[in-house]
Image (cartoon, rainbow, N blue to C red):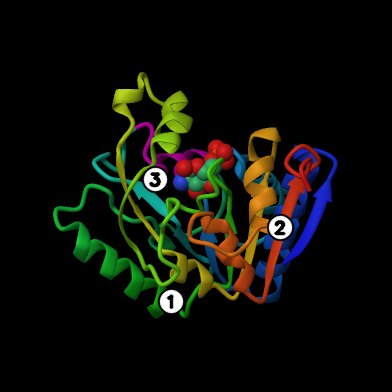
Amino acid sequence: MKWLIVEDYEKLSREAARLVAVQVAAKPASVLGLATGSTPLGMYKELTRLNREEGLDFSQITTFNLDEYVGLAADHSQSYRTYMRDHFFQHVNLSAEKTHIPSGDASDLDEECSRYEEAIAAAGGIDIQILGIGGNGHIGFNEPGSPVDSRTRVVQLAARTIEDNARFFASVEEVPTKAVSMGIQTILNARRIVLLASGASKAEAIQLMLEGEKTPEVPASLLQQHPDVTVIMDRQAASRL
Ligand code: GLP
């Protein structure tokens, strides 16, 4: 894995956007794997600027998001579909039919998971996958214990994840307890992976991921077996290395 330690969140966001922009420029019909959470917000802002001011063209791009909460309608204020619309999709020239997010309110969730895997394969696989990291080392919503060969499936959220994400909901009781998430194997199939980490709350997970053993107990550590991973982190996230 390659690591890049940058001064602050702004630099992290700019560097992440630069890597995506290089991919898009090299292959205008790239397939991007996208993440939610607070960490990639600055990257989406910078990609929007590059689209509007420097002509970075997303018109042929296809996107697949990592995950979605189970039980929230697509237009719920905290659904990842709403997040992606508000922070990225509506600001750039992506075509709506090429943006994919699992439906967390599908009547048959298992069928939805298979359909999602098939759609990724039909698009030719993911060229570059953006990831954040949970405080417990999760990637997407692959919580500790997620098997390395897992594919898109319904997962139970860990208590820590529910607590961490309660800040976005009126109360902890309103946080969904399940999600549809790409699996570890789905993520490992991406040709390139870029993981972003900012702040001291990620320092322990980053240390375990980069310096610890490869174990499903720290899902991000399973990325050690991928040939092309770049970790971009700020000084605080790197403070335990
Ligand atoms: C969520 C998402 C992850 C994300 C993580 C960290 O649970 N499913 O994809 O990486 O939280 O979020 P944040 O960037 O807000 O710390």
Query: Is the C-beta of the residue carrying label 1 under 8 Å from the nearest atom of ligand 1?
Result: no
Q: Is the magenta stretch mostly helix, strand or loop?
A: helix
Q: What residue type is labelled 2?
A: Glu
Gap between marks 2 and 3 measured at Cα = 34 Å
Mark 3 secondary-structure assignment: helix
Residue carrying label 2: 211
Q: Position of residue 15 (x, y in %)?
A: 77, 53
Choose top left, top right, bottom left or bottom right for residue 23: bottom right
Residue carrying label 1: 123
| Magenta highlight on residue 87 | yes
Tell me the mark number nearer the camera, choosing from 1 and 2: 2
Q: Nearer the viewer, residue 48 or 115?
A: 115
Choose top left, top right, bottom left or bottom right for residue 193: bottom right
For label 3, the crowd category at 10 Å Cα-Cα, with few meaning under 14, some 14 to 19 and many 20 or more, is many
In primary-sequence order, the first of circles 2 and 3 is 3
- Relative to 20, residue 68 above or below: above
Q: Where is residue 57 in the image (x, y as percent from the top left)?
A: 63, 62
Tell me the mark number nearer the camera, choosing from 2 and 3: 2
Q: Nearer the viewer, residue 83 or 191?
A: 191
Residue displayed at 45% across by 35% down:
160
- Relative to 202, residue 142 above or below: below
| Magenta highlight on residue 11 | no
Q: Residue 81 carries which label?
A: 3
Residue range (magenta): 77-88
